[in-house]
């Protein structure tokens, strides 16, 4: 019986130590201590090219035709991503600007009559300050 009492007292001391050292992190405390932005914000965007059909076609047909006519192995280009937009445009992403230029030249040569090939415009941010300069 004295063995059980000693064991219970030891367990009570350990539990008291655990409670004293327990640190409860709340969501707000974790956010206060976070210093870096998420990876998706810091990640640079990949070089992009847009291929737009000159006439309205079936969206699936556009992607199939571009994939059939442009072979990345022939021009030694790595394509990271191919996406279709609602309007039937095809967005291709590559690793580097040099690869993107080779891809653009090849696409213009092979898709000359049916598709327009261009680089997307960089959007400049616009800020509207309401009530500034008005009295």
Image (cartoon, helix red, strand yellow):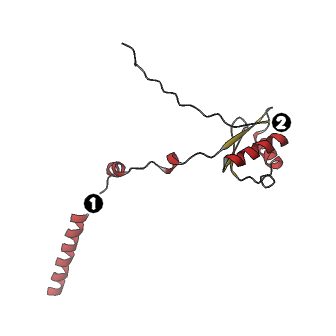
Question: Left or right of 13: which side holds 64?
Answer: right
Name above or below for residue 57 compared with residue 101. Answer: above
Instruction: Name the image quarter holding residue 55.
Output: top right
Question: Left or right of 42: which side holds 16?
Answer: left
Percent from the top left, x then y, of residue 16?
Answer: 19, 69
For the question of whether residue 1 can be seen, the reply is no
Q: Secondary structure at mark 1?
A: loop
Name above or below for residue 30 compared with residue 9. Answer: above
Q: Secondary structure at mark 2?
A: loop
Q: Residue at x 80, y 45 (%)?
A: 106
Q: Which residue is mark 1?
A: 23
Quadrant housing the C terminus = top left
Around disc 2, counting alpha carbons within 10 Å, would you say few (fewer than 14), some (14 to 19), or many (20 or more)? few
Instruction: Name the image quarter holding residue 57.
Output: top right
Which dot marks residue 117?
Answer: none
Tag 1 near tag 2, CB within 8 Å: no
Percent from the top left, x then y, of residue 134?
Answer: 39, 14
The first of marks 1 and 2 along the sequence is 1
Quadrant housing the N terminus = bottom left
Q: Which residue is mark 2?
A: 114
Question: Left or right of 16: which side holds 84?
Answer: right
Q: Residue at x 15, y 82 (%)?
A: 5
Residue sitting nearer the eye, 115 or 43: 43
Residue sitting nearer the eye, 19 or 99: 99
Q: Residue at x 24, y 68 (%)?
A: 18
Q: Residue at x 24, y 65 (%)?
A: 21
Percent from the top left, x then y, of residue 71?
Answer: 80, 51
Percent from the top left, x then y, of residue 121?
Answer: 64, 33
């Amino acid at each position: 019986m004295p063995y059980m009492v000693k064991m219970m007292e030891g367990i009570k001391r350990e539990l008291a130590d655990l409670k004293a050292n327990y640190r409860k992190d709340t969501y707000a405390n974790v956010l206060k201590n976070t210093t870096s932005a998420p990876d998706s914000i810091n990640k640079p965007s990949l070089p992009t090219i847009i291929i737009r059909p000159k006439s309205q076609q079936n969206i699936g047909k556009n992607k199939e035709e571009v994939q059939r006519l442009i072979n990345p192995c022939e021009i030694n280009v790595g394509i990271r991503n191919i996406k279709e937009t609602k309007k039937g445009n095809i967005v291709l992403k590559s690793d580097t600007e040099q690869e993107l230029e080779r891809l653009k030249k090849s696409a213009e040569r092979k898709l000359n009559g049916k598709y327009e090939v261009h680089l997307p415009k960089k959007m400049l941010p616009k800020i509207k300050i309401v009530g500034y300069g008005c009295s």
